[in-house]
Amino acid sequence: MATIREDGSVAYTLECAKYLMRSKEFRKNCVLVNDDAARFVAEGRSLFAKHVVAVGPNVKVGLDVPLLDKEGRLLAVGRAMLPRRHMSSFKSGVAVRVREGAGHAYKCSAT
């Protein structure tokens, strides 16, 4: 489900992210992707800053984050490469380096 890294951070799998997405609180750790990039992110490609729609308040550089489309479907999980405040304001650069793409979007309902 997840791996604890040496620095204490958690690297979770898609399955773990799907489970955690059931919590509304966990959505504060997510990054929303625009429609143009959603398919590519789901295929495992990195998310560039210009394709970021919104960033949860708990997102920090180096932490793992789930990437969602506008409907809340899980596209991928990856590591945040930019600070939260810069993700949606920069027009270039990798915002999230994707580690695992879903291949297609999964619908995750919050409870």
Image: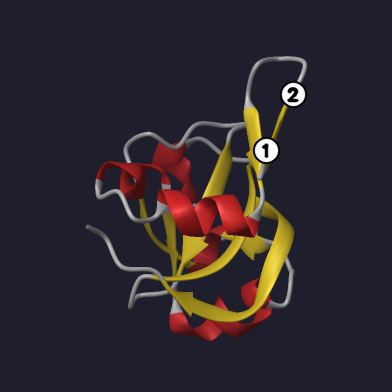
Q: Is residue 105 above or below residue 32?
A: below
2 or 46, which is in the foreground?
2
The percent coordinates of residue 58 (x first, y second) are 37, 34
Residue denoted by label 1: 11
Residue denoted by label 2: 5
Query: Mark 1 near mark 2, Cβ–Cβ under 8 Å?
Result: yes
Whether residue 60 is visible to the viewer of this picture, yes or no, is: yes
Figure quadrant of residue 80? top right
* Label 1: few (<14), some (14–19) or many (≥20) C-alpha neighbours in 10 Å: some
Q: Amino acid at mark 2?
A: Arg
The percent coordinates of residue 75 (x first, y second) are 56, 70
In the shown orientation, is residue 11 left or right of residue 55?
right
* Label 2: few (<14), some (14–19) or many (≥20) C-alpha neighbours in 10 Å: few
In the shown orientation, is residue 97 left or right of residue 107?
right
The percent coordinates of residue 40 (x first, y second) are 67, 79
The residue positioned 25% from the left and 50% from the top of the image is 24
In the shown orientation, is residue 69 left or right of residue 105?
left
In the shown orientation, is residue 23 left or right of residue 86?
left
